[in-house]
Image (tube, rainbow, N blue to C red):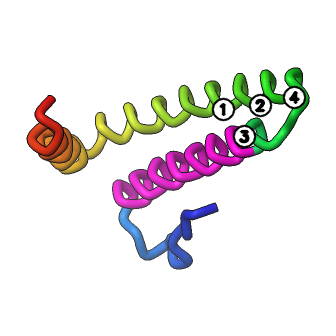
């Protein structure tokens, strides 16, 4: 997993801890999506590929759940995500 949950959790205030939990969940879901999609690309068995891609789609929904809750609880994340979208629109012309 890409996340390294803080070792000193007791030193975090409750709000920070909760945001860290959500971000760790997001990272775990992204790891799972990548794993299942990579395995699907490696197999020649259509049944296995179909199941792996279905599970990857479910993980994308889980990612969305964590992201939605993070956006609800972290106004700074909302602001910075909006800024990121604006930058992409400027760069791509969309």
Mark 3 near mark 2, Cβ–Cβ under 8 Å? yes
Q: Residue furthest front?
A: 44
Q: How many marks can you see?
A: 4
Q: Quadrant of the N terminus?
A: bottom right
Q: Which residue is mark 1?
A: 56
The secondary structure making up most of the magenta span is helix
**Inter-mark Cα distance, 3 to 2:** 5 Å
Using a 10 Å C-alpha cutoff, classify the residue at mark 4 as few (fewer than 14 neighbours), some (14 to 19) or many (20 or more). Answer: few
Residue 75 shows up from this direction? no
Q: Which residue is mark 3?
A: 36
Sequence-wise, the earlier of marks 1 and 4 is: 4
Is 38 placed above or below 6 here?
above
Residue 52, which numbered label? 2
Q: Measuring 52% from the left and 55% from the top, which residue is drawn there?
A: 24
Q: Foreground: 55 or 39? A: 39
Quarter of the image where one finds residue 47: top right
Using a 10 Å C-alpha cutoff, classify the residue at mark 3 as few (fewer than 14 neighbours), some (14 to 19) or many (20 or more). Answer: many
Residue 48, which numbered label? 4
Q: Foreground: 21 or 3? A: 3
Quarter of the image where one finds residue 67: top left
Mark 1 near mark 4, Cβ–Cβ under 8 Å? no
Residues shaded magenta:
14-38
**Inter-mark Cα distance, 2 to 1:** 6 Å
Using a 10 Å C-alpha cutoff, classify the residue at mark 1 as few (fewer than 14 neighbours), some (14 to 19) or many (20 or more). Answer: many
């Amino acid at each position: 997993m890409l996340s390294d949950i803080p070792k000193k959790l007791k030193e975090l205030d409750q709000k920070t801890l909760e945001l860290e939990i959500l971000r760790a969940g997001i990272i775990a879901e992204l790891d799972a999506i990548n794993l299942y999609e990579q395995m699907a690309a490696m197999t020649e068995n259509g049944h296995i590929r179909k199941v792996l891609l279905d599970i990857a789609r479910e993980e994308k929904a889980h990612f969305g759940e964590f992201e939605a809750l993070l956006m609800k609880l972290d106004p700074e994340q909302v602001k910075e995500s909006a800024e990121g979208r604006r930058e992409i629109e400027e760069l791509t012309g969309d």
